[in-house]
Image (cartoon, grey):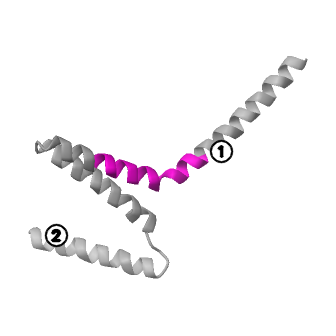
Amino acid sequence: MNNKNGLAVVLIGLGGLIILGKFGFGLGTLFGLIVPILVILLGGVAWRNGNKLLGGIIAVIGGIILLGKLSFLFVWIAAIALIVFGLSMLRGQSRTRY
C-alpha cells in the first residue's frame, strides 16, 4: 500500500467516525483529547528541530488545553480523596475511644 492509499484509508476512517457521531455513537471525547495531544506533539517536533522557545510555548499551550479537558478527572479524584480521608478520620476516632 502506497502513501496515497494509506491517506485514503485514514480519510475514510475519519469520515466514518464523523457519521457514527451523528448517529450517537461518537467519539467526541476522544477527538477532544486528540487535538491537545497533537498540539503537544507539534511543540515537541519544533523543540527537536531546534526552535526551543516556540516548541516550548506550543507544548505548554497544549498541556494547558489538555488539563482543561481532563479537569473532570481531577474533580472525581478530589471527591474520592475527600471520602477516603473522611472515612479514615472516622476509623481513627473509633479506635481511640475504646
Task: Using residue 72 as the reference point, say whether residue 11 is left or right of it.
Answer: left
* Circle 1 residues within 10 Å: few <14, some 14–19, many ≥20: few
State the quadrant of the N terminus. Answer: bottom left
User: What secondary structure is the stretch in magenta mostly built from?
Assistant: helix
Look at the image and give the residue range highlighted in magenta: 59-76
Residue 85: x, y in percent? 70, 33
Residue 61 inside the magenta-drawn segment:
yes
- Residue 95 in the image: above or below residue 86: above
Residue 81 inside the magenta-drawn segment:
no
State the quadrant of the C terminus. Answer: top right
* Residue at mark 1: 79
Q: CA distance from mark 1 to mark 2?
A: 45 Å
Query: Which numbered disc, 1 or 2, marks the residue closer to the eye?
Result: 1
- Note whether residue 25 is visible: yes
If you read the primary sequence from the N terminus, does the residue marked by circle 1 or circle 2 appear first? 2
* Residue at mark 2: 6
Q: Residue at x 74, y 29 (%)?
A: 88
Task: Report helix, strand or loop for mark 2.
Answer: helix
Residue 40: x, y in percent? 29, 50
- Residue 70 in the image: above or below residue 80: below
Q: Residue at x 45, y 53 (%)?
A: 68
Residue 13: x, y in percent? 29, 73
Q: Tell me which amino acid carries mark 2.
A: Gly
Q: Which mark is residue 63?
A: none
